[in-house]
Amino acid sequence: QVQLVESGGGLVQVGGSLRLSCAASGRTFSSYGMGWFRQAPGKEREFVAAISRRGGNTVYKDSVKGRFTISRDNAKNAVYLQMNSLKPEDTAVYYCAAGRTYNSASWEYDYWGQGTQVTVSS
């Protein structure tokens, strides 16, 4: 099975930047599509970004296009989310996930990390 551990969350001011990392265990990391999701208090989990197995294809939530960039380094078994021009509405717990595809639907993913808190202060 795949184990995922997120890191890089924290407190940042409006307009600032943050890079989230997700470290995966196992030798089959490159066999999975990877996604980032987020959940704010009292709200449902929502899709943020996803990337294909080799990194050649990406998908983004409309509200983060042009600000967030998802990438992966299969040699390091890691996926990243670079977040720029952060807004208060980006505040949430961010989760990375692994699945057979890179679809925006959370139920398409089989493995999930513990989450990392991102807080954007105004």
Image: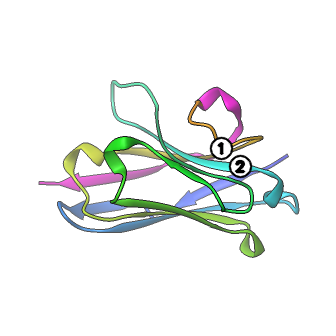
Kindly state the secondary structure of the residue where label 2 is placed: strand
Answer with left or right where residue 16 lies relative to residue 20.
left
The residue positioned farthest toward the front in the image shown: 56
For residue 32, above or below residue 24: above
Horizontal side of 37 relative to 103 (left or right) equals: left
Indicate the amino acid at tag 2. Answer: Gly
3D distance between C-alphas at marks 2 and 1:
5 Å
> In the image, which disc is placed on residue 102?
1
- Secondary structure type for disc 1: loop
Q: Is residue 62 left or right of residue 21?
A: left
Q: Residue at x 35, y 53 (%)?
A: 118
Mark 2 lies on residue: 33
Q: Is residue 76 left or right of residue 60?
A: right
Residue 17 x, y percent position in the rendering: 31, 68
User: Residue 115, position in %: x, y?
Assistant: 52, 47
Q: Is residue 18 visible?
A: yes
Residue in front for this viewpoint, 85 or 122: 85
Quarter location, residue 73: bottom right
- Asked if residue 96 lies in the magenta stretch, the reply is no
Q: Residue at x 36, y 67 (%)?
A: 18
Picture layout, residue 117 above or below residue 110: below
Magenta-tinted stretch: 106-122
The spot of residue 93 in percent (x, y) is 42, 44
